[in-house]
């Protein structure tokens, strides 16, 4: 049985007195959507996620992490990866902190790392339509970036399909917003930059009748967090890693 220890990796940690801009620098890395916060002895205090990194839009800021820290998902080194995945689903995170018996952080496990192994050794049943989220929050290409920023703040979702006349035309993600200095400046200055200027146009999709196992394979192959579900060119839902895990037997 493979355990958290087999997938543990060094993860960046911060102190609650560190500035939010330091966290944002880490969160620009595609591997990390959460950053864990520790005290001087590396005892786990909590975590912040990429949404928190968006709350302060200024390039330079004296705002510290302290006010954003929340309860963290944790695992022990000997926990099975299925247990780890269940913890991630409970907290709706893409990682867990691995701690020793004294709650000291010894590393972390990323959902992207264990996801291929879990789906390869467990059966996935049913079509995409059974697991997808059908009540989709989406944006339009002519909407201003400030709108998607507000949507992220209110929903906590990682990404949104971009739809024009019921047709999928792209995807806009938290990563798109946090990684670009131009985009962050537009948000901070309430500039009239549109989502179409920042969205990803080359989008991997699935159909509602496709098997959920096919969606899982596409998520692994393209290393994406969200797949739009389309019927023809029309968006009918979305599916992510957590949705796939719900199909495990």
Image (cartoon, grey):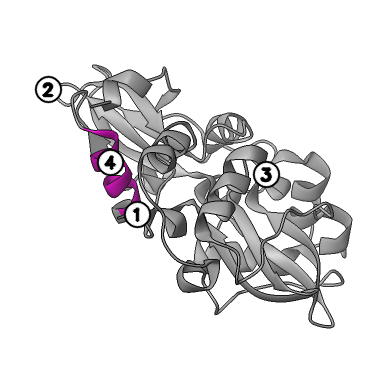
**Residue that numbered label 2 is attached to:** 102
Name the side, left or right, on which 184 lies relative to 107. right
Determine whether the residue tagged by mark 1 lies in a helix, strand or loop: loop
For discs 4 and 3, the disc positioned in front in the rendered view: 4
How far apart are the two marked residues, 2 and 3, measured between alpha carbons? Answer: 34 Å
Q: Going from the N terminus, do you reach mark 2 or mark 3 first?
A: 2
Left/right of residue 16 with respect to residue 127 in the rendered view: left
Q: State the CA–CA distance, disc 1 to disc 3.
A: 33 Å
**Residue receiving disc 3:** 178
Precedes in sequence: disc 1 or disc 2 = 2
**Mark 2 neighbour class, 10 Å CA radius: few under 14, some 14 to 19, many 20 or more:** few
State the image coordinates of residue 192 (x, y, percent, origin top left). 87, 65
- Label 4: few (<14), some or many (≥20) within 10 Å? some
Dot 2 or dot 4: first in sequence order is 4
The segment highlighted magenta reads 80-89
Asked if the residue at tag 3 contacts the one at tag 2, i.e. Cβ–Cβ closer than 8 Å, the answer is no
The residue tagged 1 is 248
Q: CA distance from mark 1 to mark 4?
A: 10 Å
Q: In the rendered structure, find residue 82 and report the number of the disc placed on it.
A: 4
Q: Nearer the viewer, residue 191 or 140?
A: 140
């Amino acid at each position: 049985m493979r355990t958290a220890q087999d997938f543990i990796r060094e993860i960046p940690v911060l102190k609650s007195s560190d500035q939010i801009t330091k966290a944002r620098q880490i969160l620009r890395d595609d591997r990390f959507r959460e950053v864990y916060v520790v005290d001087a002895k590396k005892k786990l205090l909590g975590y912040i996620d990429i949404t928190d990194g968006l709350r302060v839009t200024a390039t330079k800021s004296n705002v510290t992490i302290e006010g954003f820290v929340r309860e963290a998902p944790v695992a022990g080194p000997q926990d099975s990866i299925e247990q780890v995945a269940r913890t991630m689903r409970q907290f709706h995170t893409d990682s867990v902190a691995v701690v020793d018996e004294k709650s000291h952080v010894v590393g972390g496990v990323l959902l992207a790392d264990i996801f291929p192994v879990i789906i390869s050794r467990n059966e996935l049943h049913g079509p995409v339509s059974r697991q997808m989220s059908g009540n989709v929050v989406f944006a339009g290409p002519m909407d201003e970036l400030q709108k998607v920023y507000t949507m992220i703040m209110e929903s906590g979702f990682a990404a949104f399909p971009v739809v024009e006349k019921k047709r999928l035309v792209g995807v806009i993600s938290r990563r798109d917003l946090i990684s670009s200095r131009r985009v962050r400046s537009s948000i901070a200055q309430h500039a009239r930059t549109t989502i179409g200027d920042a969205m990803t146009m080359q989008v991997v999709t699935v159909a509602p009748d496709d098997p959920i196992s096919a969606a899982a394979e596409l998520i692994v192959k393209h290393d994406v967090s969200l797949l739009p579900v389309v019927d023809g060119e029309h968006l009918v839902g979305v599916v992510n890693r957590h949705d796939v895990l719900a199909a495990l037997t």
